[in-house]
Amino acid sequence: MGNPVRRLENVLNCLADTAIACGVLERVEAVVTDWGSSQPLGEAVCLSPEACRIVRFVEVPPDLAKIAQADSAYPEVIALNTAARHSRGKFVGRIDQDTVVGREFLVRFFAWCDRKAKPPCDLEKGYLFSLRRQIPFAFASSEPNWGGVQDYIAAVGRLLVVERECKIYFENPVGIMLISKRLWEEIGGYDERLIYWGWMECDLAYRVQKIADLVDITDDVACSFFHQEHYDPATPRVTPRKRNPQNRAPMDRHPNSATWGLKAHAARISTGIGDPKAMPGSAQELVAADATVTAAIRRARRDAFIRYKRFVRERIWRLFCALFRVASYWEYLKRVWLAARGRTGFFS
């Protein structure tokens, strides 16, 4: 729905720009699986020169993709395993292609890696998970460029709603799922039998929990992952895709075959092509983009203020109800005490 290529452009360009601001561009890579595209995705996206330095596309040709996905519309687990297999870093971090990575995460994570801050667990043996915030559909559907998305996040990122639907944190929509590459190889990545929609992060967490620490880092990184919403709030937020079965007690720690992640197939690796369209446009385009971003920022601040007022009203009402119950209980105790002393009847 919407323009997924534009959303991917925003994610990759914002990641490169944020990594530069944090001084970690040379320590970051983004691997994207181009699953069965007739036109290579690397030629379709408009990336900045800095983004081209860190982005690699793993191209899975249409004939191989058709065989691997069987009757699934898109076997996300196989695509993710393929991307992770071609990654060169020490850690594997999985995000959706439309989720922007914020500055707070990069700063905090590399501080943990460099021992400048105490990590929440042994990073080599941890399953780290963060929730995400929601960039409203009204703004995301206007297809802003990555500069507009960055300005929006900088202005109102902390005011955006955190997606929290389930009590168990890793059963919520994923901002990032992060584990070490060594642990990833040990457990065989995602279960490639789950070729339909959903549950892959949960299955991975339940499989790895016996040998790793499961840690919610949402608050540690200020929930600095921002999903570009592509569902119109006027319609139900559901997917027509078939869902994976939900099993909270998987038996297999490593459920995949020896060729998981398409190991038996040679993949073509390409880099993005720097495109002038990824750079700022004409003066008229910049003015129009700024107006869109400014209006969206005002709307986000207004919505946040409305949520705050609702929150305050609810807390005041709860406090009033609690005081009323205390007063009623106190009157009840007073009557019991007076009746026990014989000064008055209990029901008088």
Image (tube, grey):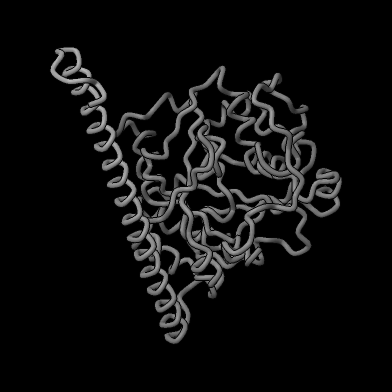
Q: Is residue 29 above or below residue 210?
A: below
Residue at screen point 15% across, 13% down: 342
Location of the C terminus by quadrant is top left
Location of the N terminus by quadrant is bottom right
Quarter of the image where one finds residue 259: top right
- From the viewer's perspective, tell me whether residue 319 is left or right of residue 252: left
Q: Can residue 227 be seen?
A: yes
Q: How many tags in the picture?
A: 0
Image location of residue 337, percent across then percent down: 18, 17
Image location of residue 9, percent across then percent down: 56, 63
Q: Please tell me which residue lies in front, 67 or 89.
A: 67
Residue at screen point 37% across, 39% down: 219
Quarter of the image where one finds residue 306: bottom left
Residue at screen point 56% across, 56% down: 98
Image location of residue 269, percent across then percent down: 68, 51
Q: Is residue 97 above or below residue 294?
A: above
Residue at screen point 42% across, 36% down: 217
Q: Can residue 90 be seen?
A: no
Q: Is residue 253 above or below residue 296?
A: above
Q: Please tell me which residue lies in front, 74 or 301.
A: 301
Residue sitting farthest toward the bottom: 284
Image location of residue 21, percent across then percent down: 35, 55
Q: Is residue 289 above or below residue 158?
A: below
